[in-house]
Image (spheres, grey):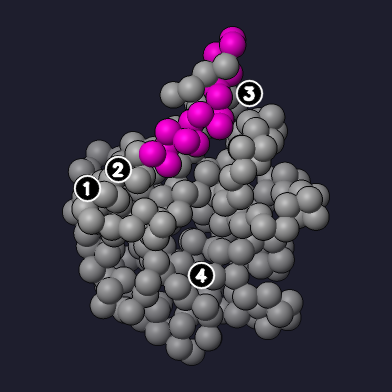
Amino acid sequence: MGLHDAGVPDIATNLAEVRARMVRAAADCGRDPGSIELIAVSKLQPEDRVAAALAAGHRLFGENRVQEAEARWAHRRADHPDLTLHLIGPLQTNKVRDAVALFDAIETVDRPKLVHALARGMAQSGRRPDCFLQVNTGAEPQKAGVAWAELDDLFRLAAGDCGLPVVGLMCIPPADDPPAPHFALLAEAAKRLGLPRLSMGMTGDFETAIHQGATQVRVGTAVFGERAPKR
C-alpha cells in the first residue's frame, strides 16, 4: 500500500494498485476488466483522503450512512457532475427520501417495507436510483439482507409489483467463511433472475469476487488505509 510521509496513505498510488489487481484478476478468468467497477468505500474516511481520491480522478464512491454522505457529497456535486454514489449500508425507511435524492444506486434493498418506501420516494421525486437486492447469504441473524428463501418474492415485489429499477444483487459473506461459495451462489441467483450486476468483494476478497463474476467491488482499506478509531 502506498504511503506518504508520516504514514499518510498515498491514495493515487493505492487506487492504481487496486485497479492493477482488478485487471490481473479479470485476465485470470478471461473477463474484460472494463466490465468491473471499483467502488471506493469512503465511509468514515477523513476528508483529505476523499479529496485525494477525487484529485486522482476517481468518481465512484460507496457510503454507509445517508446523513454522513449528505454532509460529504451534496456540496461536491456541482464541481463533479460525473460523481456516482452508492449507498452500501442499511437504509431506514425514514431516510428513503434523502437517499433517493442523493444516491445513484442503493445496494441494500432487503425487505418489503423498504421496497414500498422506495417506490413512494421515487414516484414523488422523479429520481430512480439503481437498486440492488442485498442477500444475507450466510443467514447471519445480526446482518441485513433478505434470506435465500425470500429472495424470489422480494424480487417480484420490487421489480414487478412496485416497478423499482432492480439491476443486481449484493452480498457480504460471513467473515469466517470462505467467500467464493457465497459469491458463486449470488452469481447463480442473479443469472436466474436475469440481473446483470453483482456487487460483491471487499479489500480482502475482491479478486475472488471478480473470479466469480462481480461487476462492482467495494474496496475501502486498500484504497484509503485503515480508518481512524472512533472516539
Q: Which of marks 1 and 3 precedes in the sequence? A: 1
Q: Residue at label 4?
A: 131
- Mark 4 or mark 3: which comes first in sequence? 4
Q: Residues within 10 Å of mark 4 (few under 14, many from 20)?
A: many
* Foreground label between 2 and 3: 2
Give x and y (percent) for residue 4: 57, 16
Q: How far is mark 2 from mark 1, CA to CA?
A: 6 Å
Residue 12 counted in the magenta span: yes
Compared with 153, 88 (above or below) is above
**26 versus 107 height, above or below:** above
Is there a contact, CB below 8 Å, between mark 4 and mark 2?
Answer: no
Say which residue label 2 marks. 24
Other-residue count near label 1 (Cα within 10 Å), few / some / many at <14 / 14–19 / ≥20: few
Give the residue at x 20% y 43%: 178
Labels 4, 1: front one: 1
Would you say the magenta stretch is mainly helix, strand or loop?
helix
The local secondary structure at tag 2 comes to helix
Q: CB atoms at circles 4 and 1 under 8 Å apart? A: no
In the image, which is nearer the foreground, mark 4 or mark 3?
4
The disc, 2 or 3, on the residue closer to the chain's N-terminal end is 2
* Kind of residue at disc 1: Asp
Q: Which residue type carries mark 3?
A: Arg
Where residue 10 sits, quadrant-wise, is top right
Magenta residues, as a range?
5-20
Calculate the distance from the C-alpha at mark 2 to the C-alpha at mark 3: 38 Å
Pointer 1: what residue? 28
Contact, mark 2 vs mark 1 (Cβ under 8 Å):
yes
Viewer-nearest of discs 4 and 2: 2
